[in-house]
Image (cartoon, rainbow, N blue to C red):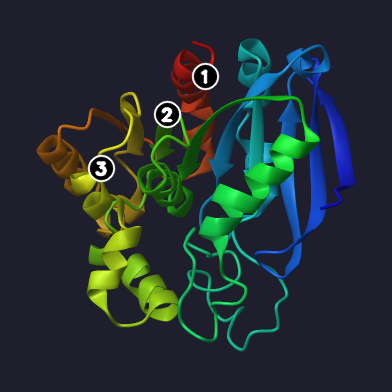
């Protein structure tokens, strides 16, 4: 699995790079960002995976989150993949912002039309990790976080793969996709009409039966002025209730005045990297 370096920029003593590769899982060329902290030049570092939201590529996090400074301080490598396969020539893949291109929802599709390419869950939890582990000086400890659709992705990647990640956090995640319009559209398209099957990709359902190693305190930041919160797309209270039922520790911070944008993410990204550093650097 050969990597092609697309770009590199010196940042806080380390390097912000973007690579491309031909994905076996997704059957297309994929890009991902890697921030290599200065500590990676002399030893092995832990890895924090960032999963972005609807319409995003790897560039949104790389250029807008302001994470490099804090990753350098804590000696953590951050990997930021794209959000879906690209250019697969599937009819309808570019018709809407919330399904198809830019909207992979971090699941493996089972519907005939999408199942060959739309395998983002396997891409994140298998292929990309194998590629990162083979290509960079990593310690073997890793965590995951994300935003919106990617917050959903981070939660389900951690809950569906016990022991894979040391910790998980999210900004304004889609917490209960079975019960919101975004999730219902994506799940119907990718997984079909069997709503029982959807539950295997819904954090609020998955956490109720989670029995793996502790994921620390799951940290969630949610802006109070997020218009998608008001529209019922995110449903963080449902996840908190499910965590309480399952006795899984979660901290939901409702942030006054903040919206759904990267201005919100950049404000609290330091807190999230510090949160993961507690577990990754322990």
Foreground: disc 2 or disc 3: 3
Task: Note whether residue 81 is visible.
Answer: no
| Quarter of the rendering containing residue 95 | bottom right
* Gap between marks 2 and 3 measured at Cα: 14 Å
Q: Which is nearer the N-term, disc 1 or disc 3?
A: 3
Q: Name the residue under label 3.
A: 210
Q: Is mark 3 on a helix, strand or loop?
A: loop
Q: Which of 10 and 260 is in front in this view?
A: 10
Residue 173 at what x, y percent from top left? 37, 47
Residue visible at 38% across and 36% down in the picture:
258
* Gap between marks 1 and 3 measured at Cα: 21 Å
Residue visible at 60% across and 77% down in the picture:
116
Q: In this view, does 90 lie above or below 280?
A: below
Q: What element carries label 1?
A: helix
Q: Name the residue under label 1.
A: 280
Q: Mark 2 points at which residue?
A: 167
- Crowdedness near tag 3: few (<14), some (14–19) or many (≥20) residues, C-alpha within 10 Å: some
Question: Quick check: 156 left or right of 175?
Answer: right
């Amino acid at each position: 699995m050969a990597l092609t370096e697309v770009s590199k920029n010196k940042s806080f003593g380390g390097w912000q790079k973007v690579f491309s590769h031909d994905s076996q899982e997704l059957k297309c060329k994929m890009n991902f960002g890697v921030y290599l902290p200065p500590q990676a030049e002399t030893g092995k570092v832990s890895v924090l995976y960032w999963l972005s939201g609807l319409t995003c590529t790897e560039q949104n996090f790389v250029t807008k989150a302001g994470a490099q400074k804090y990753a350098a301080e804590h000696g953590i490598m951050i990997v930021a993949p794209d959000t879906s396969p690209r250019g697969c020539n599937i009819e309808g893949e570019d018709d809407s912002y919330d399904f198809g291109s830019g909207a992979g929802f971090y699941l493996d599709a089972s519907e005939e039309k999408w199942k060959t390419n739309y395998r983002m869950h396997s891409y994140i939890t298998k292929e990309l990790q194998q590629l990162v582990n083979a290509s960079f000086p990593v310690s073997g400890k890793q965590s995951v976080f994300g935003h919106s659709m990617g917050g959903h992705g981070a939660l389900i990647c951690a809950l569906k793969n016990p022991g894979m990640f040391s910790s998980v956090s999210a900004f304004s995640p889609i917490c209960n996709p079975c019960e919101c319009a975004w999730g219902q559209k994506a799940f119907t398209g990718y997984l079909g009409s069997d709503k029982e099957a959807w539950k295997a990709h819904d954090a609020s359902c998955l956490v109720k039966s989670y029995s793996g190693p502790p994921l620390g305190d799951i940290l969630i930041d949610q802006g109070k002025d997020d218009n998608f919160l008001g529209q019922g797309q995110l449903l963080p209270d449902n996840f908190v209730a499910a965590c309480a039922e399952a006795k899984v520790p979660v901290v939901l911070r409702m942030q006054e005045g903040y919206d759904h944008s990267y201005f919100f993410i950049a404000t609290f990204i330091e807190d999230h990297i510090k949160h993961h550093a507690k577990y990754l650097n322990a």
